[in-house]
Image (cartoon, rainbow, N blue to C red):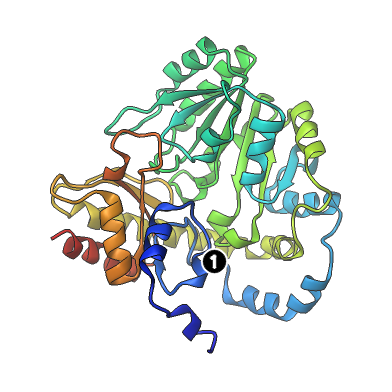
Amino acid sequence: MNSTAQYNVPLRSGDVSDLVNRFPGGYWKYDIKDFVLLVNPYFPPQAFLDELKEALPRLIACYPSPNVQMLQLLADVVKIPAHNLVICNGVAELIPILLGRLGMRIAVPVPTFNPYETTALPGRLSRFILPPPHFELDVHCYAAFARANCVDAAVVISPNNPTSRIVPYEDLLYLASALRDQQQLLLIDESFIEFSEVGRSASLENHLIEFPNVIVLKSLGKIYGTCGLRIGYAASSNAQTMNEIRAALPAWNVNTFAEFFLSKLPHLAQAAKQSWIRVGSDRDKLYADLRSIDGMRVLKPDANFVFCELPPHFPDGDVIASKLLKERRILIRHNGGKTIQNGKRFLRIASRTEDDNRLLVEALKVISD
């Protein structure tokens, strides 16, 4: 069987249920259009992929460089001093350290990225409900909630996953200040901020010295289209917490493919910025097209995905997702596994190319009949 044919086998009924309802990943094995994983379809450029292909035999055979050299590569990319950084095998590597090993008591606005809820130790999680239909974070109420619940840290994802809504810059500055006065940390995940209209200019990475209570968490896979490389980082001027994180990490936690990628990124900065603009344009068209579906309530997105509530006459999201996968080989994500009332009535749809997005919207209109 050739390499193309093995990804065109029919999906079994068990595969459909598994793909629709399980934790995401492993989709490369299937011939499907994936609207679940939140990546950038316009990066990295082909020239880099050609370089990677040529370097592959050497990269497979070698250990990555020592951590201090990895940190300098990262610092050159994100323009933050290396001593204020921790590099990681994706943000998912840091969450168990912060919430498990360090045992932080946390406040989390929900719905959110599930590992922030599932990794917290028993009795150390306080959920702050984001009110429908807009799911906006009231930072004044959230700061008061963090104080009342005596948490060590308050979590914010901005833009949020799954709602794709950004927390306004001034609101974040207020929250950082309020939590600092309360001697509480702000763990802010900014993995999607480059896709927003304001971009990284509104990042709290610009205020690390002013707010030593802020720890910025960042996955690079989303914005650079390289989730399989598993590169992320934490940024903070909080030396104590950063040293505790470093002490919990293995000597080689980032592989040679990620190191090779980081070494090339400074030369690809302009191509990356152009790709983020393209993603934003396609996402805005997807948002407008989804709004054209009668009865569909769609939140204006700030990330590279769109969050919407199904019309009353549509089946639940898991039914829609199963039909799309079986009949169209299109995979979408329902929110039945999130902390949100009637989660199966909500979809989080990753933006792909303009043509792919159009196919999805057309399929949604047909499949609901």
**Would residue 282 appear left or right of 247 to someone viewing this image?**
left
Position of 222 with respect to 308 (left or right) is right
Label 1, secondary structure: give it.
loop
In the image shown, does 311 or 275 lie closer to the viewer?
311
Quadrant of the snapshot with the C terminus? bottom left
Q: Is residue 360 left or right of residue 118?
A: left
Question: At which x and y percent is residue 135?
Answer: 34, 32
| For residue 317, above or below residue 8 | above
Q: Residue at x 67, y 62 (%)?
A: 265
* Residue at the bottom extreme, as displayed: 1
Q: Position of residue 163 (x, y in %)?
A: 38, 41
Q: Is residue 319 above or below residue 134?
A: below
Percent from the top left, x then y, of residue 84?
75, 37
Residue 217 falls in image quadrant: top right
Q: Could you say where residue 68 lies in the image, as x and y percent from the top left?
A: 85, 49
Which is nearer the eye, 94 or 239? 94
Relative to 129, does residue 331 appear above or below in the rendering?
Answer: below
Q: Amino acid type of disc 1?
A: Phe
Residue at the (43%, 24%) spot, across then down = 128
Residue 319's quadrant in the figure? bottom left
According to the image, label 1 marks what residue?
Answer: 43
Q: Is residue 218 left or right of residue 316?
A: right
